């Protein structure tokens, strides 16, 4: 379910939200959706963030326990879209205690070398 006023997608398993004042997309829980079609509402939210007239985007993944390969693909496409907006800086916050994040977040940095990767 999507609430356009708060720009949040929340289910029993996960929450993806965008806080405009802090320019932060926060992903929490476990994203185990089946294929890109099920990720479409999240892709739409991320696309609207990438298209926002902003100079910075923060992607906070510190509370995202699990992300499957379709989810990683979705985040990669988001990073590439932000990269194409040359005036936008991007930071990604991750957690060293969540196993999938180490390698996967470094790969996002390869897609956008200027990406600022921060660990808690």
Image (spheres, helix red, strand yellow):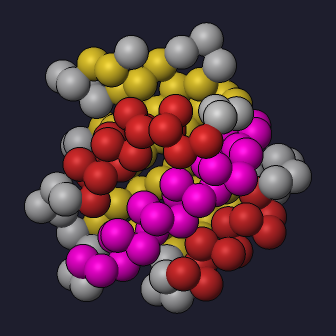
Instruction: Point out the stretch of residues depicted in magenta.
Output: 62-85
Find residue 94 and report its image quarter. bottom right
Could one spot residue 59 in this view of the protein?
Answer: yes
Q: Main secondary structure of the magenta part?
A: helix
Q: Residue pushed farthest top?
A: 12
Q: Is residue 83 magenta?
A: yes
The residue under the point 59% across, 78% down is 109
- Nearest the viewer among 95 and 34 is 34
Find residue 102 and report its image quarter. bottom right
Q: Quadrant of the N terminus?
A: top left
Q: Is residue 82 left or right of residue 4?
A: right
Give the vertical position of 86 relative to 64 (above or below).
below
Please state the horizontal and vertical placement of residue 26, each as a whole percent of the image: 48, 40
Find residue 12 and report its image quarter. top right
The residue under the point 35% across, 70% down is 81
Please state the horizontal and vertical placement of residue 79, each as a whole percent of the image: 45, 68
Please state the horizontal and vertical placement of residue 98, each as a whole percent of the image: 82, 47
- Nearest the viewer among 14 and 40 is 40
Q: Is residue 75 left or right of residue 43?
A: right
The residue under the point 65% across, 19% down is 13
The residue under the point 30% across, 80% down is 84
- Nearest the viewer among 71 and 100 is 71
Q: Is residue 85 left or right of residue 78?
A: left
- Nearest the viewer among 19 and 31 is 31
Q: Is residue 53 left or right of residue 17?
A: left
């Amino acid at each position: 379910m999507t609430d356009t006023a708060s720009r949040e997608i929340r289910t029993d398993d996960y929450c993806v939200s965008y806080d405009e004042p802090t320019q932060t997309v926060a992903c929490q829980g476990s994203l185990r959706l089946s294929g890109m079609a099920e990720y479409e509402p999240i892709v739409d939210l991320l696309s609207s963030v990438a298209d926002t007239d902003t100079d910075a985007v923060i992607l906070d993944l510190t509370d995202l326990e699990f992300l499957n390969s379709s989810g990683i693909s979705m985040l990669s496409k988001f990073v590439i879209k932000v990269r194409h907006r040359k005036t936008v800086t991007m930071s990604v916050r991750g957690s060293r205690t969540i196993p999938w994040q180490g390698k996967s977040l470094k790969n996002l940095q390869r897609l956008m070398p200027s990406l600022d990767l921060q660990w808690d």
